[in-house]
Amino acid sequence: MSAPARHVVACLFVDFGDKSRPPRARYECVPCNYASPVVTGVDAVTAFVATAAHEHRITCINYQEAS
């Protein structure tokens, strides 16, 4: 028996940065074509990564229909 097909529905992109640039992150939802603004800085990226997916799912009509 094969595993059910899986589909990418969202992406969380994180660039950890280096000495010349700060970390940054963004979130994209494939079904609704949402793309968050880019967040930069250690504290902002940390908070964003912890909540981005959950916060978007609250408002995403496509996610609510699939649930």
Image: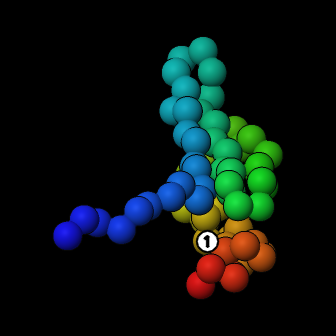
Q: Picture coordinates of residue 44 (x, y %)?
A: 66, 49
Left/right placement of residue 14 relative to residue 28 reads left
Q: Which residue matches tag 1?
A: 54
Q: Secondary structure at mark 1?
A: helix
Instruction: Tell me the residue at 62%/28% (across/down).
Output: 22
In this orientation, which residue lies closer to the viewer: 41 or 62?
Answer: 62
Quadrant containing the N terminus is bottom left
Residue 47, relative to residue 21: is it above or below? Answer: below
Task: Decide: few, some or many residues near mark 1? Use Cα within 10 Å; few <14, some 14-19, many ≥20.
Answer: few
Residue furthest to the front: 1
Instruction: Tell me the residue at 25%/65% (across/down).
Output: 2
Residue 9, relative to residue 41: is it above or below? Answer: below
Left/right placement of residue 4 relative to residue 39 reads left
Quadrant containing the C terminus is bottom right
In this orientation, which residue lies closer to the viewer: 8 or 53?
Answer: 8
Q: Picture coordinates of residue 65 (x, y %)?
A: 69, 82
Q: What is the three-letter code of the residue carrying label 1?
A: His
Residue 9: quarter of image: bottom right
Residue 6: quarter of image: bottom left
In this orientation, which residue lies closer to the viewer: 49 or 10?
Answer: 10
In this orientation, which residue lies closer to the viewer: 22 or 53?
Answer: 53
Q: How many callouts does the rendering have?
A: 1
Instruction: Tell me the residue at 62%/79% (across/down).
Output: 66
Does any portion of residue 47 appear in the rendered image? no
Does any portion of residue 27 appear in the rendered image? yes
Q: Picture coordinates of residue 46 (x, y %)?
A: 56, 52
The image's colour scheme reads: rainbow
